[in-house]
């Protein structure tokens, strides 16, 4: 049987006086008050890039020249894929702003795709980071036509096997 006169397992006494002695007369602090969390720009860039790519109608991220240079860099054995190409962010203590350069598929409603991208990016960044997304600016740099080849497929089909 449990002894009901012993102090609780948390180590706090039953009387206010004991609690004040241990706490210095102050209210207990929440875990959020006991440290600081900072979120890097690159974290928000990756989340934004993934959320953008999830939207149907997005062909790729990045403006023309950046896409071409990135496609070459992606093929270098030691190179890392440019996941965040076409994404730039500003991250403050409580807010973030996202700028995206995208290429959309031919035939989709650009305004509908932009709205879906905006909603998806805001939801993902706010859910994962707790930051308020104040704006998502989208620049549609190109339309990918069905008969156009990607920069990556041109090189992979090379002349010599």
Image: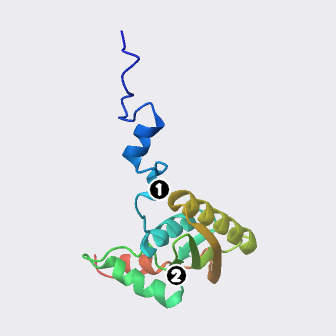
Q: Which residue is mark 2?
A: 62
User: Measured from the top left, where is residue 13 in percent x and y?
Assistant: 40, 33
Residue 36 image offset from top left, x and y in percent: 42, 64
- Closer to the chain start, of discs 2 and 1, is 1
Q: Secondary structure at mark 1?
A: helix
Q: Is residue 57 left or right of residue 35?
A: right
Residue farthest along the front direction in this orientation: 17
Can you tell which of label 2 and label 1 is closer to the viewer?
A: 1
Which residue sits at x=41%, y=82%?
Answer: 70
Q: Could one spot residue 94 in this view of the protein? A: yes
Give the quarter of the image for residue 5.
top left
Q: Which label was assigned to residue 32?
A: 1
Crowding at dot 2, Cα within 10 Å, few <14 / some 14-19 / many 20+, comes out as many
- Examine the image and state in which quarter residue 19 appears: top left
In the rendered image, the quadrant that contains the N terminus is: top left
Instruction: Depth check: give the residue in front, 12 or 44.
Output: 12
């Amino acid at each position: 049987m449990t002894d009901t006169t012993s102090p609780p397992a948390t180590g706090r006494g039953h009387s206010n006086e004991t609690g004040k002695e241990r706490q210095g007369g102050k209210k207990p602090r929440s875990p959020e008050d006991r440290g600081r969390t900072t979120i890097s720009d690159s974290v928000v860039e990756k989340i934004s890039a993934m959320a953008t790519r999830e939207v149907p109608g997005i062909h790729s991220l990045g403006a023309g020249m950046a896409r071409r240079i990135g496609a070459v860099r992606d093929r270098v054995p030691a190179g890392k894929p440019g996941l965040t190409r076409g994404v730039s962010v500003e991250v403050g203590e409580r807010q973030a702003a996202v700028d995206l350069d995208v290429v959309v598929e031919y035939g989709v409603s650009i305004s509908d795709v932009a709205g879906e991208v905006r909603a998806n990016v805001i939801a993902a960044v706010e859910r994962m980071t707790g930051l308020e997304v104040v704006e998502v600016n989208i620049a549609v740099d190109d339309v990918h036509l069905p008969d156009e080849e990607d920069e990556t497929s041109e090189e992979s089909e090379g002349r010599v096997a």
